[in-house]
Amino acid sequence: MRDALELGDISELLRFDEPRPKTPMSQDSRLLKIFRVGKLTTDRFEELCLVRAVGAGGVMAHVHSPLAARQRVRIELGSDRQFWGNVLWTKDGTAGIGFDGQVDIAEVLARAGDETDDRRSHGPRLAIDCRAKLRVGAQFHWVRVHDLGQTGAGIISDEALENGSEVVITLEGFRPIPASTAWRRDGRIGIAFNQPIPFGELMQWLQYMFGRTCVEIRGGAH
């Protein structure tokens, strides 16, 4: 797909007004059609979003929470790739977001897909606070979850677990998830899920657990 499209500027498509009639992505050389989970952060909340198209000047994404035109936002496309920009338009749950400057999308997408075994727990995360039950062998421990994404979670625990230890984590109100430990620092442990949580299932759990799919930010965006 990447070879068939030129990674170009989509600033005209993302202009501040009603989006022009859409042409098939395969016929629009300025866009690269993707289907990737990202994280959207505003001054009030953060949420996971589905990035559907990306170019050097911005993205189009399916969002779950209301956004306002000209609203300042940050988009995370990978575990360490974050870009500031502004909402240019919204329509039917889709938002056009223009980056502050041009970015090298080919490099961003390559880095986001280059994950080794010790990076399995990386990816967009939401800062949450809930209990979970951690099973290690035949023993069970209660832990606190401080962040969560499709591919892993960060927990707070005093358990002495070696990296690579097989565990099963059961989030409050959710099903058991087979996983393994990826890292440990200062009483915090990174958990990498054996299989990603389906996006829709994760959204349903967030809605059930917190009453909404976004997470409120206390004190503004960081």
Image (cartoon, rainbow, N blue to C red):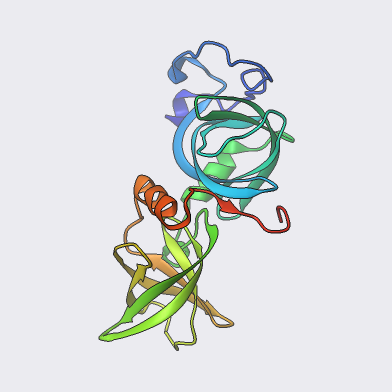
Residue 56, image quadrant: top right
Position of 56 with respect to 50 (left or right) is right
Q: Which quarter of the figure is the C terminus placed in?
A: bottom right
Residue drawn 66% across the image and 30% down it: 57
Q: Position of residue 155 (x, y in %)?
A: 49, 73
Name the residue furthest left: 138
Residue drawn 50% across the image and 14% down it: 22
Residue drawn 40% across the image and 53% down it: 208
Viewer-nearest residue: 175 or 160: 175
Give the answer, above or below, for where 57 lies relative to 198: above
Residue 8, image quadrant: top right
Q: Position of residue 127 (x, y in %)?
A: 56, 61
Give the answer, above or below, for where 79 lies relative to 182: above
Residue 35, image quadrant: top left
Numbered circles on residues, count? 0
Name the residue furthest top: 21
Position of 201 with respect to 112 (left or right) is left
Q: Is residue 161 visible?
A: yes
Q: Position of residue 122 (x, y in %)?
A: 49, 60
Q: Which quarter of the figure is the N terminus placed in?
A: top left
